Image (tube, grey):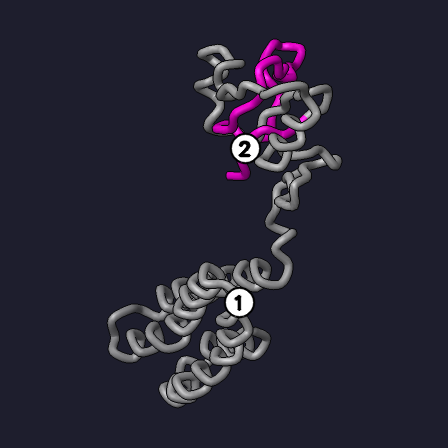
């Protein structure tokens, strides 16, 4: 990325055809290792990386070619080339973060996916239902979580990832479409609304 930034600086400060020809050769060679650093990891990060590198290569190859052909003026070339390069760098940085430091993109207090949410709270799932049935006498009747909410709360439910529900004396993070035992109690705030964890947007 440092080499690409230096090459972009050379292109913007020296708009001679010889400089452009040199950029046509060097830019693709420099970008190849960057693609390999992400391509073997995740498909979404690879797509973002590819779009970012296309923006970078466009600022170093397509726009200089357009300037040489007289399709754009020098002033527009400087502005568009710099913006395209910076956009490409930003997309490359995001793809690198997605692969090597994905926790930086997580929302604060985001529930983990290992069966526990924030603050060590348990997530209500198939294993939780089995434990609940074994701890209660006889069979346990399950009802949809929505049955415990009023109409206004049901309308807000799609934007929540979890709802706090007390089941058999234990507070669980319950997904909106789950079933809970009869007698479960939804945790509510001072305003009377249920307490939950919103989806990360």
Q: How many marks?
A: 2
x%, y% of residue 50? 42, 67
Q: Which mark is residue 112?
A: none
Looking at the rendered image, the quarter that the N terminus falls into is bottom right
Q: Position of residue 178 (x, y in %)?
A: 51, 28
Tell me if I can see residue 86 in this picture.
no
In the displayed structure, does residue 84 sit left or right of residue 101?
left
Label 2 with label 1: CB-CB less than 8 Å: no
Q: Main secondary structure of the magenta part?
A: loop
The vertical placement of 181 against 90, above or below, is above
Left or right relative to 180: residue 14? left
Observer-nearest residue: 52 or 73?
Answer: 52
| Crowding near the residue tagged with mark 2, few <14, some 14–19, many ≥20 C-alpha atoms within 10 Å | some
In the current view of this chain or complex, which residue is farthest to the front? 138
Nearer the observer, 163 or 83: 163
Residue at position x 74%, y 37% in the image: 120
For the point 57% across and 36% down, the residue is 126
Boundaries of the magenta span: 172-201
Q: Is residue 189 above or below residue 34?
A: above
Residue at 50% x, 63% y is 42
Q: Which residue is mark 1?
A: 41
Q: Circle 2 is placed at which residue position?
A: 161
Q: Is residue 157 left or right of residue 16?
A: right
Q: Of callouts 2 and 1, which one flags the residue occurring earlier in the amino acid sequence?
A: 1
Which one is nearer the viewer's eye here, 147 or 20? 147
Hey, which quadrant is residue 17 in on the image? bottom left
Looking at the image, residue 104 lies above or below residue 87 = above
> Crowding near pointer 1: few (<14 within 10 Å), some, many (20+)?
few
Q: Is residue 36 visible?
A: yes
Q: Is residue 64 magenta?
A: no
Cα distance between the residues tagged 2 and 1: 27 Å
Residue 150 picture location, percent across and down: 49, 10
């Amino acid at each position: 990325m440092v080499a690409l930034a230096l090459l972009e600086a050379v292109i913007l400060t020296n708009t001679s055809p010889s400089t452009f020809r040199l950029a046509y050769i060097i830019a693709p060679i420099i970008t190849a290792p960057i693609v390999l650093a992400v391509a073997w990891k995740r498909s979404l990060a690879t797509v973002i990386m590819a779009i970012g590198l296309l923006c970078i290569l466009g600022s170093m190859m397509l726009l200089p070619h357009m300037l040489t052909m007289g399709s754009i003026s020098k002033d527009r070339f400087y502005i568009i080339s710099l913006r395209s390069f910076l956009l490409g760098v930003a997309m490359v940085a995001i793809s690198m973060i997605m692969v090597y430091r994905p926790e930086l993109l997580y929302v604060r207090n985001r529930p983990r996916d290992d069966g526990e949410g924030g603050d060590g709270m348990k997530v209500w799932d198939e294993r939780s239902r089995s434990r609940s049935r074994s701890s209660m006498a006889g069979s346990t009747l399950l009802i949809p979580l929505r049955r415990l909410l009023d109409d206004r709360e049901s309308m807000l439910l799609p934007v929540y990832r979890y709802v706090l529900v007390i089941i058999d004396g234990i507070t669980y993070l319950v997904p909106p479409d789950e079933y809970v035992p009869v007698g479960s109690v939804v945790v509510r705030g001072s305003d009377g609304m249920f307490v939950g964890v919103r989806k990360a947007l």
